[in-house]
């Protein structure tokens, strides 16, 4: 049985006080031993403050990015060990905004995924097609290429630790949510890829999140699909009420 997993990606939003207040509001409402894993992913400069705010709660901490090298002359970058040191359990990798705006390739996502796993961080690896790719009938091919490139060379044991987020680019921050059927179709394909590239047991274990304009009013239906095990939430994670509403949808 895969535990539902809802993660909030706060992106480059909020200030320190907002982050702490939001983290506290979420942490107060997420019960320990509850049926859903929950994480918040603040901007990296506020990771430490948020770590303090959620200390002792059931909410996990995630970063939005990291570099694959261990340490050294990499100005501006953060290593996996640094994220672990500040209290992170998760790290989002290969988000479409990073792929599109910062030219992050599948090969780089792959190096980052391996570096995260090496220190015990759980990578949330994002894949997803653009609108032009979907309209061109290329969704399956694009997602397969991203899957193969980003997850190349992982052992079955490593793969079973990874979370994959399917985030159609056209649904991110646009209010255009994929229908449950559209999302489920790609999630089912990802599950098949896990079985064929790794093993049926790995496919059963790996959690697949949907991301793209998830809101309290569409979460329950998306999350009730057989291959959708959670959500990666952007805009609706910036308010405690809407994020908690989505978490409630995962329990329904
Ligand atoms: C995201 O960027 O991961 C995301 C899913 O954003 P939104 O929920 O705002 O579409």
Image (cartoon, rainbow, N blue to C red):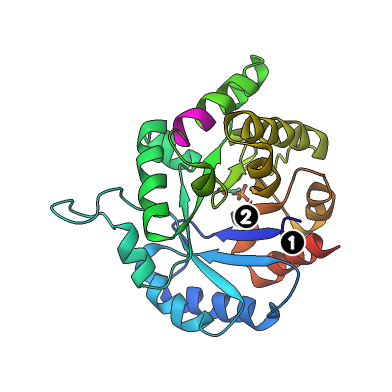
Q: Which mark is residue 38?
A: none
Secondary element type, mark 2: strand
Label 2 C-beta lies within 8 Å of the nearest ligand 1 atom: yes
Residue 156 image offset from top left, x and y in percent? 54, 42
Pick the quarter of the image with the N terminus.
bottom right
**Mark 2 / mark 1, whichever is N-terminal:** 2
Residue 193: give x, y in percent of width and height: 63, 30
The residue stretch that appears in magenta: 147-151
Q: Would residue 241 appear left or right of 85 to someone viewing this image?
A: right
- The answer to which image quadrant residue 195 occupies is top right
Which residue is pictured at 58% across the width and 60% down the height? 8
Q: Does residue 53 appear left or right of residue 34 in this picture?
A: left
Magenta region includes residue 150: yes
Mark 2 touches mark 1? (CB < 8 Å): yes
Residue 48: name its quadrant: bottom left
Give the main secondary structure, helix, strand or loop, of the magenta stretch.
helix
* CA–CA distance in space, label 2 to label 1: 9 Å
Task: Determine which residue is flagged by label 2.
Answer: 233
Residue 65: in sight, yes or no? no
Residue drawn at (49%, 73%), measured in percent from left and top?
Answer: 19
Q: Is residue 7 left or right of residue 220?
A: left
Which mark, residue 246? 1
Residue visible at 83% across and 55% down in the picture: 220
Question: Can residue 18 be seen here?
Answer: yes
């Amino acid at each position: 049985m895969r535990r539902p997993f809802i993660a909030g990606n706060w992106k480059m939003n909020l200030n320190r006080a907002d982050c702490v207040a939001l983290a506290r509001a979420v942490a107060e409402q997420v019960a320990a031993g509850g049926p859903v894993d929950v994480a918040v992913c603040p901007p990296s400069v506020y990771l430490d403050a948020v770590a303090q705010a959620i200390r002792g709660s059931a909410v996990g901490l995630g970063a939005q990015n990291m570099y694959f090298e261990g340490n050294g002359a990499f100005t501006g970058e953060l290593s996996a060990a640094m994220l672990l040191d500040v209290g992170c359990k998760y790290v989002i990798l290969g988000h479409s905004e990073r792929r599109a705006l910062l030219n992050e390739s599948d090969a780089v996502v792959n190096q980052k995924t391996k570096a995260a796993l090496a220190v015990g961080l759980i990578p949330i690896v994002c894949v997803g097609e653009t609108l032009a790719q979907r309209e061109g009938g290329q969704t399956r091919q694009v997602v397969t290429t991203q899957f193969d490139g980003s997850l190349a060379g992982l052992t079955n044991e490593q793969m079973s630790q990874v979370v994959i987020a399917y985030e159609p680019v056209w649904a991110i921050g646009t209010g255009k949510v994929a229908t449950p059927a559209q999302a489920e179709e790609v999630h089912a394909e990802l599950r098949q890829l896990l079985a064929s590239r790794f093993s049926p047991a790995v496919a059963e274990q790996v959690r697949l999140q949907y991301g793209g304009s998830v809101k309290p009013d569409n979460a329950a239906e998306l999350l009730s699909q057989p291959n959708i095990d959670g959500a990666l939430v952007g805009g609706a994670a910036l308010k405690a009420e809407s994020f908690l509403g989505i978490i409630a949808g995962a329990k329904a």
